[in-house]
Amino acid sequence: MKLNPLHNQVGGHDGVLSMGEDNEIIVKPSLPQELAFYEESVLHPELAAWMPAYYGSLTLTRDPAAIAAMTATNEDGAVNSEGAVAAAIKAFNGYPVGDFLPLNTFDQANPDKDPEVPLPVEKGEFDDECICLENVSHGFTKACVLDLKLGTQLFDDNASEEKKARLGAVSDNTTSGKLGIRLTGFHVYDGEKEEFVKYSKQHGKSLTEATILEGFRSFFAAKLGPQRMRLVVERFVNDLTDFLATIQEEELRMRSSSLLMMYEGDVEAFDKGVLEEQGNIAKVVERAQAHLERQDDDDEEDEDEDEDDEDFEDEEVKQKVTDMRLIDFAHSTWTPGMGPDEGVVLGVKSTLSLFEQLLVTDYPEDE
Ligand SMILES: Nc1ncnc2c1ncn2[C@@H]1O[C@H](COP(=O)(O)OP(=O)(O)OP(=O)(O)O)[C@@H](O)[C@H]1O
Ligand SMILES: [Mg+2]
């Protein structure tokens, strides 16, 4: 199995990778704090429902000896993949592994050269600890992606004084301080030109309380027509409302986490996604009715029920319309007894009110 750079990464440090037949798994070099946060998230199912599914961790190596083992061939010239896997993967939980290739950024001719991927080294000199996550963009055809950084305080309480001062200034001088949100970066699909328009971290930092709505307008600029765009914004308003209720109940501190917001930017794929969802709803209603009718009958119907279940699985939504998840827990901790993170709550409320404003001004109901 080959690791690829994540093609639609919009924020953060370079080095987020993806793998799987359709790049459905994210492999992100991580600090122990993020790994621990994901591990503990099973105890917080309401919040975990907003996080990408967590598949476990793996260790990648840049150890020249391991890489030599991976690329070694046996007598008939085939790559000795068993030895390769044993040498290259020190730990993997939760996902069936085929064989791996080393990070393609490793320069075999210059083993001392720093790889392009800046990786925290935790285990051995050459080992990179990674978390494996659901790729939220899997299921989109042309994903428009926004990384929206949450919270007013962007540093850990245990950060160095220098870092506290630096990130304190970033918060004060951007929308993070007053609104609890900052647009970190985003990609929008332009269906007419058939290309993505990319907005940088600097663009997000330059926005102010007065111009942030313009920033969101740029994110909602895929040319899908007002009705589809209204649906997109409405769905985010619903998600944000539910997410706000959850986050107000959770006792944690999230520093520099993000909401990853995505919507389909290709018109045909968008409509296909909506139709698939409607088909699924119809199927659920049909099944519920059939179930009620069956309650009058006896166990002899059990076999039919199993068949229905199979049909239903076949109808799962394959094309997404929108999705919203919470990511990046490198500086997050569960803090029982300390109440919710008020800076994050502020950020979600600000976003909600800006999106509600957009619905009124840009996408009025009757249009
Ligand atoms: N589960 C995911 N699905 C899809 N894209 C993701 C996922 N996780 C991360 N990404 C992409 O990668 C980018 C960076 O991720 P993230 O914010 O977790 O890393 P980072 O900011 O570099 O983290 P750190 O603070 O740990 O260095 C995101 O902005 C997003 O574009
Ligand atoms: Mg980030």
Image (cartoon, helix red, strand yellow):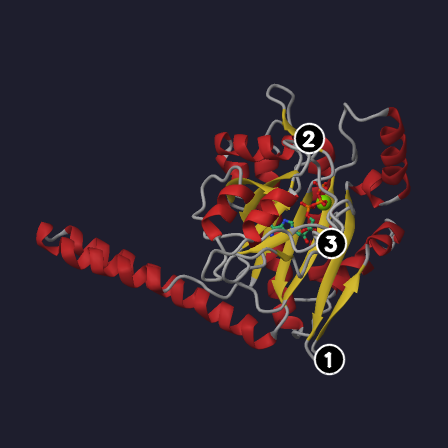
Residue receiving disc 2: 341
Lateral position of residue 177 relative to residue 77, left or right: right
Question: Which quadrant would the C terminus be assigned to in this image?
Answer: bottom right
Q: Amino acid at mark 2?
A: Asp
CA distance separating discs 2 and 1 = 42 Å
Residue most toward the bottom?
Answer: 192
Q: Nearer the viewer, mark 2 or mark 1?
A: 1
SS class of the residue under badge 2?
A: loop
Q: Are marks 3 and 1 in contact (CB under 8 Å)?
A: no
Cα distance, mark 3 to mark 2? Answer: 48 Å
Q: Which residue is mark 3?
A: 109
Q: Nearer the viewer, residue 26 or 157?
A: 26
Which image quadrant is residue 129 in?
top right
CB contact under 8 Å: marks 2 and 1 = no
**What's under tag 3, amino acid-wise?**
Ala
Which one is in front in this view, the residue at disc 3 or the one at disc 1?
3
Q: CA distance from mark 3 to mark 1?
A: 41 Å
Question: Which residue is depicted at the point 47% across and 39% down?
Answer: 93
Q: Secondary structure at mark 1?
A: loop
Work out whether residue 40 or residue 26 is closer to the camera in this orientation and state it.
26
Residue drawn at x 61%, y 36% is 247
**Judging from the image, what secondary structure is the residue with disc 3 in?**
loop
Q: Which is more foreground, mark 3 or mark 2?
A: 3
Q: Is residue 183 visible?
A: yes
Q: Which mark is residue 193?
A: 1
**Amino acid type of disc 1?**
Lys
